[in-house]
Amino acid sequence: MTTEQIEAAYTIASERYGTMGVDTEKAMEILSGIAISLHCWQGDDVGGFEVPDGELGGGLAATGNYPGKARNADELRQDLDAAYSLIPGSHRLNLHAMYSETGKKRVERTELAPEHFARWTDWAKAAERGIDFNPTCFSHPMAESGFTLASADESVRRFWIDHCKAARKIGEHFGRELGTPSVVNVWVPDGYKDTPVDRVSPRLRLAESLDAVFEEELDPELQLDSVESKLFGIGSESYVVGSHEFYLGYAVSSGTLLCLDAGHFHPTEVISDKISSALVFLDEILLHVSRGVRWDSDHVVVLSDELQAIAQEIVRGEFLDRVHIGLDFFDASINRVAAWTIGTRCMIKALLMALLEPIDELRRLELDEDFTARLAMLEELKTLPFGAVWDYYCLKQEVPVGPAWLDAARDYEKNVLSKR
């Protein structure tokens, strides 16, 4: 499409939305200020760059063998830059501790410090990009038992407590250097493959360990703590210590953020329905947006009904300043840069759709108990020319419009990825 065609289609679309009381310019302005946190681990299949390399553990699995994955941090940053160039808006990075750069020197996870992420800091600072952070409590000899912060072995617990403490200080450094708080999210894989006799003791140990991790108060202007639940994992099918109920209680009692991961619940559960409930009791939450297919399979995010429902809850509830949106998927069967681009663009599309709703009118109808008109209006919105607004937004943000981004991704694959 030509620029003239995109602008002409947008003018008509804007007028259509205007008849329903929606200001498309305002919606795009709000959208441009929403930062999505792209997850670094899509680019290298959750491998990390530790010395020596370890095997992926903790019940995680990346499937596929598409050529061109990042082999080092420089390549990963290059690939991320390629993805960011195809995504409208200004966005963040979600980084795991296993992506440290220590040269050829082995540095234990408990000894990681800001200096081991200096090149990440410089890269993000140059792009005016915030970094979120995660301790890596898996893929390590001290996690081979399947337990970390909830281990019955005090030395194992102490190791992971110290690692999480180090991660918080690294997050604090990112916040200070980059001028935006770093959300540091703690997830541990602890659990049993078969039904345990004692369910409570591991949870008491986990709570005690978390208290030790968060003992030092850090400036929330620099660093925010978050905890993440899971229903089950490979190797912990029958019992996960850090269940949703456990972490919801912990977050409410301790004041941390609660991370809701779209793949960490029963296949018939959705996180969109949990957002407003959590935010009645919590100041802020973190989302890990993924797409589970029958289990926590971390498929690339698509513009599904649930993705739209997540965005609607955030916008309708006026939670944009209280919800941190991160992505969490890793598909090694397709072009990894394209995976980032598809998933992030879909998340942004869902937010734009939600911002293009006549929310005040819909609320009024609901309060008036005019459920007929509410349903009718919601259905009419589905056929409004959203695509024309989306194309215009991409044009304004100077990124490829429509499927043109795929041509750019193919060129990058031909010129960069295929040569690795």
Image (cartoon, rainbow, N blue to C red):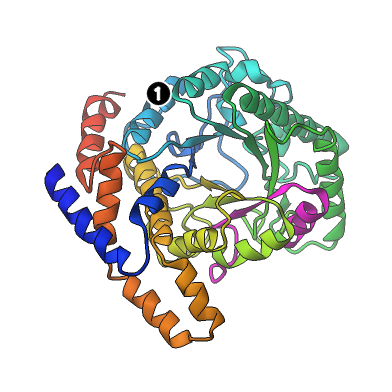
Is residue 72 visible from the viewing direction of this image? no
Image-based side of 201 in relation to 284, left or right: right
Q: Is residue 361 a member of the stretch shown in magenta?
A: no
Q: Position of residue 72 (x, y in %)?
A: 45, 22
Up the image or down, 197 lies above or below 411; here it is below
Residue at 36 percent of width and 58 percent of height? 23
Q: Count all numbered tags in the image, as a single digit.
A: 1
Would residue 204 be found to the left or right of residue 299 on screen?
right
* Residue occupied by mark 1: 75
> Who is closer to the viewer here, 113 or 318?
318
The residue sitting at the top extreme is 104
Determine crowd level at label 1: few under 14, some 14-19, many 20+ residues with C-alpha closer than 10 A. Answer: some
Residue 279, image x, y percentages = 67, 59
Q: Is residue 270 above or below residue 91?
A: below
**Mark 1: which secondary structure?**
helix
Q: Horizontal placement of 69 versus 325: left or right?
A: left
Image position, residue 123 (x, y; %): 48, 20
User: Can you say whether 259 is above or below 72 in the image?
Assistant: below
Q: Residue at (34%, 47%) from the top-left corner?
A: 342
Q: Quadrant of residue 107?
A: top right
Q: Could you say which is closer to the camera, residue 419 or residue 37?
A: 37
Residue 249 highlighted magenta (yes or no)? yes
Determine if residue 144 is in view. Answer: yes
Residue in front for this viewpoint, 70 or 22: 22
Q: Is residue 217 left or right of residue 330?
A: right
Which residue occupies 59% across, 31% down? 180
What amino acid is at disc 1? Glu
Residue 36 coordinates in the image, percent (x, y): 48, 43
Q: Quadrant of the C terminus?
A: top left
Q: Which residues are magenta?
A: 245-270
